[in-house]
Image (cartoon, rainbow, N blue to C red):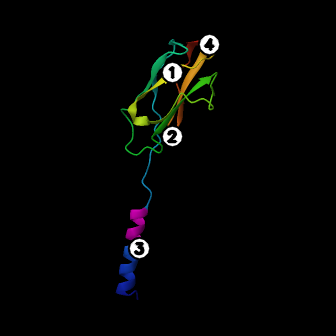
Amino acid sequence: MISFTTFILTLLALFSLSLSAPMRRDVFVPPIVYPQAGVVWTAGHHHNVTWKTDDAPVNITNGIGRVYLATNSIIDLDHPLAIGFNIRDGRVAIEVPSVPTGQNYSIVLFGDSGNYSPQFTIVGL
């Protein structure tokens, strides 16, 4: 037969385990709303990259954002356009880098996932 003390200690152990359980976090994949297809940016100009935040979960796995430029879906990880911002902000200002003129550019937004904008044009300097 189990003693009262053993029973109480078992309950306390189970209770403490439930308190130390990791908080459930959700992956947030916000759709980029700007730039859109058909947009033309000029190197050296400033723009706001914007994304939807209205359905952001309470607990985001990684709420620190990064923005990169991709060419033909290849991300230039060596030259971030913006880093260290709150993914819940819904926008971040960037300077358009000096790149060759082309219609195959995308913005990639990383928080706890990576999602691409539609392709758009950059007019290089």
* Real-space CA distance between mark 1 and mark 3, rounded to the nearest whole angstrom: 54 Å
* Real-space CA distance between mark 2 and mark 4, rounded to the nearest whole angstrom: 29 Å
Left or right position of 68 against 53: right
Q: Which numbered circle lies on residue 95?
A: 1
Front-lying residue, 75 or 98: 98
Look at mark 2 in the image and give the residue it sits on: 112
The range drawn in magenta is 13-20
In primary-sequence order, the first of circles 4 and 1 is: 1
From the top left corner, tell me how far across and down residue 60 is, in percent.
Answer: 43, 43
Neighbourhood count class around disc 1 (C-alpha, 10 Å): few under 14, some 14–19, many 20 upward = some
Q: Residue at x 43, y 35 (%)?
A: 87
Look at mark 4 in the image and give the residue it sits on: 102
**Which residue type does callout 2 highlight?**
Asp
Neighbourhood count class around disc 3 (C-alpha, 10 Å): few under 14, some 14–19, many 20 upward = few
Q: Secondary structure at mark 3?
A: helix
Labelled pair 4, 1 in contact (Cβ < 8 Å): no
Q: Secondary structure at mark 2?
A: loop
Front-lying residue, 121 or 46: 46
**Which residue type does callout 1 highlight?**
Glu
Neighbourhood count class around disc 2 (C-alpha, 10 Å): few under 14, some 14–19, many 20 upward = some
Q: Nearer the viewer, mark 3 or mark 4?
A: 4
* Real-space CA distance between mark 4 and mark 1, rounded to the nearest whole angstrom: 17 Å
Look at mark 3 in the image and give the residue it sits on: 13
Labelled pair 3, 4 in contact (Cβ < 8 Å): no
Neighbourhood count class around disc 4 (C-alpha, 10 Å): few under 14, some 14–19, many 20 upward = some
* Real-space CA distance between mark 3 and mark 4, rounded to the nearest whole angstrom: 62 Å
From the top left corner, tell me how far across and down residue 66 is, in percent.
Answer: 51, 34
Quarter of the image where the N terminus is located: bottom left
**Which residue type does callout 3 highlight?**
Ala
Q: Nearer the viewer, mark 3 or mark 2?
A: 2
Labelled pair 2, 4 in contact (Cβ < 8 Å): no
In primary-sequence order, the first of circles 1 and 2 is: 1
